[in-house]
């Protein structure tokens, strides 16, 4: 096979590589032909020594694909390392900055529930305890006053517990959003 046919087949079989890579490879094989011709060899002899253009192209494509795979593995490895560092930094941020206020909010929420339950049972206690206990120097409370306090404390206790339930749901939703935000940052 003559030089032109050989280089044409080589160029055609190198599809998939960048044009710059193809030009560099073909230029190298043109030099092989020039060196061989200067030594007195025929174009057919040179093409036989070089081997099949298809095999040569296959080797270059495999080498290029291997480099591409190594590059992907390196990027994935670096991506994993970056995620690990990000996970540690985010964990430290959550531990140092977020955890304290979060525990404080949970404490306030528990306090709201405690206040609501306490007021509810205070109303129940007044209802059952007023007829039997004298209060200070005033004496016994009037039964209508006791019923009023009872209804007021029970109602206020129920409202505060309902407020606590609403705030607990809100805190739950915010916690889920914050966790999803953290996961989104790590997965990036």
Image (cartoon, grey):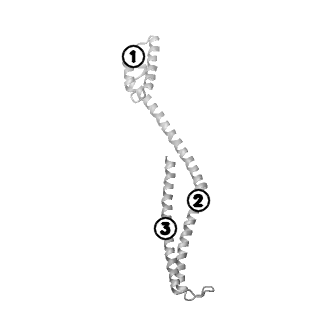
| Residue nearest the observer in this picture, 6 or 11 | 11
Q: Quadrant of the N terminus?
A: top left
Q: Secondary structure at mark 3?
A: helix
- The CA span between labels 1 and 3 is 85 Å
Give the vertical position of 53 relative to 159 (above or below): above
Q: Quadrant of residue 9?
A: top left
Q: Quadrant of residue 101?
A: bottom right
* Mark linked to residue 101: 2
According to the picture, the residue beneath numbered tag 1 turns out to be 3
Q: Secondary structure at mark 1?
A: helix
| Residue nearest the observer in this picture, 87 or 185 | 185
Disc 1 to disc 3: CB gap under 8 Å = no
Closer to the camera: disc 1 or disc 3?
Answer: 3
- The earlier-in-sequence mark between 2 and 3 is 2
Query: In the image, what residue occupies the spot 49% across and 73% down?
Result: 158
- The earlier-in-sequence mark between 1 and 3 is 1
According to the picture, the residue beneath numbered tag 3 turns out to be 165
Give the vertical position of 83 relative to 121 (above or below): above
């Amino acid at each position: 096979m003559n030089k032109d046919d050989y280089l044409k087949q080589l160029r055609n079989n190198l599809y998939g590589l960048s044009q710059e890579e193809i030009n560099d490879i073909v230029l190298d094989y043109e030099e092989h032909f020039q060196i061989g011709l200067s030594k007195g060899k025929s174009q057919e002899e040179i093409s036989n020594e070089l081997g099949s253009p298809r095999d040569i192209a296959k080797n270059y494509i495999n080498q290029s694909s291997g480099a591409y795979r190594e590059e992907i593995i390196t990027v994935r490895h670096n991506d994993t390392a970056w995620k690990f560092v990000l996970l540690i930094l985010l964990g430290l941020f959550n531990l140092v900055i977020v955890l304290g206020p979060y525990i404080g909010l949970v404490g306030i929420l528990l306090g709201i529930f405690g206040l609501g339950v306490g007021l509810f049972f205070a109303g129940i206690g007044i209802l059952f305890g007023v007829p039997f206990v004298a209060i200070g120097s005033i004496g016994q409370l009037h039964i209508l006053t006791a019923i009023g306090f009872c209804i007021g404390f029970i109602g206020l206790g129920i409202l505060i517990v309902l407020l606590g339930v609403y705030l607990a749901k809100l805190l739950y939703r915010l916690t889920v959003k914050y966790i999803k935000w953290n996961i989104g940052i790590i997965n990036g």
